[in-house]
Amino acid sequence: MDFLHINRAKAVFDEIYGLDDPRAYFSALGDLDYMIPDVAEPVVRQILSAKASMTGVKPTVLDVGCSYGINAAVHRFPLTFTGLRHRYARREIRAVSSETLVELDRNFYAAWPDVGLARFIGLDISAPAIRYATGVGLLEQGVVADLETGDLSVEDARIVRSADVIMSTGCIGYVTEKTFGKILDATERHPWIISFVLRMFPFEPLAATFAKRGFVTERLAGATFIQRRFHDAEEFENTLATLAALGIDATGLESEGLFHADLILSRPEADARAAPLEDIVTVASGRGRPIGSRYVHVEGDEGLRVALEP
């Protein structure tokens, strides 16, 4: 089953990524208890710490599918996606122009201490999102490119070349091994690749691409990471059907009305031997976080039916 087919099960949010600021992004995804930036951040921090311990230098992270730079925001500053969502929901913030908001946000982020373990660069197909993320100082540099259909320019390859770590928290499924292969061809530092991947998207094609470059891939056992609630009953049922077709048991995970992602780390074999994933990561997956109503299956007189559980 290919990614294009699998994506038909998911709701489409394309419109929120092409705007000049992230207000619609926070509104639409916040309403679905989107939490992957927050639940991923402690794990990303542990992996970056392990990487820095090996090299003795502050790593450069390339965030693939970075959109408005939110992963950089929650890593570099004592902020959360949830807290930022409340900021952008304020009446005063909703009322200003995008130009004014960029100026406000530039000052907002500059006022916080930078507690990050890395510098961030980003890649996304959305020019407005990259422009915002670099304009407010979340990303040092950004690349606008669709590497599924095109190639990196000479200048973009120069930016990507410095990556010590490549990370993604939701773009796999929209991008494939084509994108990651072109990125790796441009790098020079044998980067670690941190991937949070929805369980409905097979990772084997990417792992094979990485293996050709001498990388090994580890999947964290015993934990998954909540991304968000399902948008509607159709997305819920389609996702369960997709998982069933792939032979993946959704019981206690997606069946409870939530998208779940696996943590996968790919890197040179020597690095994996020196610091196994299970030794450097401890997790809190988001299961204890308060969330809104979820689509679930309940038993009725005529068998299972979909219900919205408060």
Image (cartoon, rainbow, N blue to C red):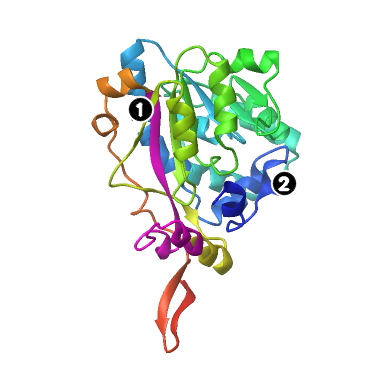
The image shows residue 302, relative to residue 37, as above or below, that is: below
Dot 2: element: helix
Residue type, numbered disc 2: Ala
The stretch of residues the image draws in magenta is 240-267
Can you give x and y, in whole percent of width and height, for residue 16 in the image?
Answer: 68, 46
Q: Is residue 221 left or right of residue 268?
A: left
Residue extending farthest to the left is 279
The quadrant of the picture occupied by the C terminus is: bottom left
Dot 1: element: helix
Q: Which mark is residue 47?
A: 1
Q: Is residue 40 left or right of residue 6?
A: left
Mark 1 near mark 2, Cβ–Cβ under 8 Å?
Answer: no
> Which of 82 and 307 lies nearest the eye of the viewer?
307
Check disc 1: other Cα within 10 Å, few if <14, some if 14-19, many if 20+: many
Give the residue at x 62% y 12%.
158
Question: Nearer the observer, disc 1 or disc 2?
Answer: 1
Give the residue at x 23% y 30%.
279
Can you give x and y, in whole percent of width and height, for residue 239 in the image?
Answer: 51, 60
> Which of 34 and 237 lies nearest the eye of the viewer?
237
Q: Which mark is residue 95?
A: 2
> Which of 306 and 89 lies nearest the eye of the viewer?
306
Of marks 1 and 2, which one's residue comes earlier in the chain? 1
> Which of 88 and 118 lies nearest the eye of the viewer?
118
- In reply to whether residue 36 is colored magenta, the answer given is no
User: Quarter-wise, where is residue 125 in the image?
Assistant: top right
- In reply to whether residue 246 is colored magenta, the answer given is yes
